[in-house]
Image (spheres, rainbow, N blue to C red):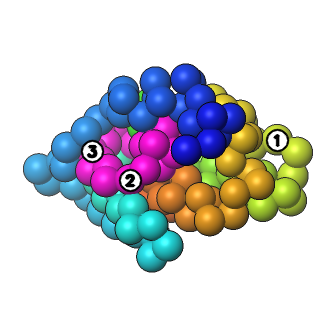
Amino acid sequence: MTAALYNRDILRLAASIPHLGRLEAPQGSAERSSPVCGSRVAVDVALDREGRVEALGQEVRACALGQASASLMGANALGRTAEDLAEARDSLSAFLAGGRDDPGDWPGLEVLAPARPFAARHASILLAFEAAAEAARKAGR
């Protein structure tokens, strides 16, 4: 383990993932996995009449970075639209790849900055945001 990569903030987030467990009657669900490391995240959502996430469930089987990312996604997903989730996914992806200097407006994502040089970790970090954006898109149909 690289100390700079798996720092105290990452480990604290990984140990406190909100909205764990699947929803009984989701309006949209999506699952993403990383073939590189085997991490897997499934996300269920229910939207309100305005198309905002009112209920979220997630099942996370990932490394500490994937868990930390799922923690940040889950902590801030309620009240968000499918477009908000897609924007967060895209901003985080561009940030990790070096295409932008900041991770976007989603709270807390700057804690993932130490992972930028580790391209093999990016897929796991993106799983929760990819699954959440897809689940919300499906729910909004």
The numbered mark, 2 or 3, whose residue comes first in the sequence reads 3
Q: Which quadrant of the view contains residue 139?
A: bottom left
| Residue sitting at x 39%, y 61% | 39
Which residue is label 3 attached to?
57
Q: Quadrant of the N terminus?
A: top right
18 in the magenta segment: no
- Please report the residue visible at 73 percent of the width from the left and 40 percent of the height from the top: 113
| Secondary structure beneath label 2 | loop
Q: Circle 2 sits on which residue? A: 62
Q: CA distance from mark 1 to mark 3?
A: 27 Å
- Provide the residue span drawn in magenta: 53-71
Q: Amino acid at mark 2?
A: Ala
Residue 63 lies in magenta, yes or no?
yes
Disc 1: which residue: 102
Q: Amino acid at mark 1?
A: Asp
Q: Badge 2 local density, few (<14 within 10 Å), some, or many (20+)?
A: many
Nearest the viewer among 130 and 63 is: 63
Work out whether 41 lies above or below 23.
below
Q: Which mark is residue 88?
A: none
Estimate the x, y position of residue 84 in percent, counting from the top left. Answer: 60, 48
Residue type of the residue flagged with mark 3: Gly
The local secondary structure at tag 1 comes to loop
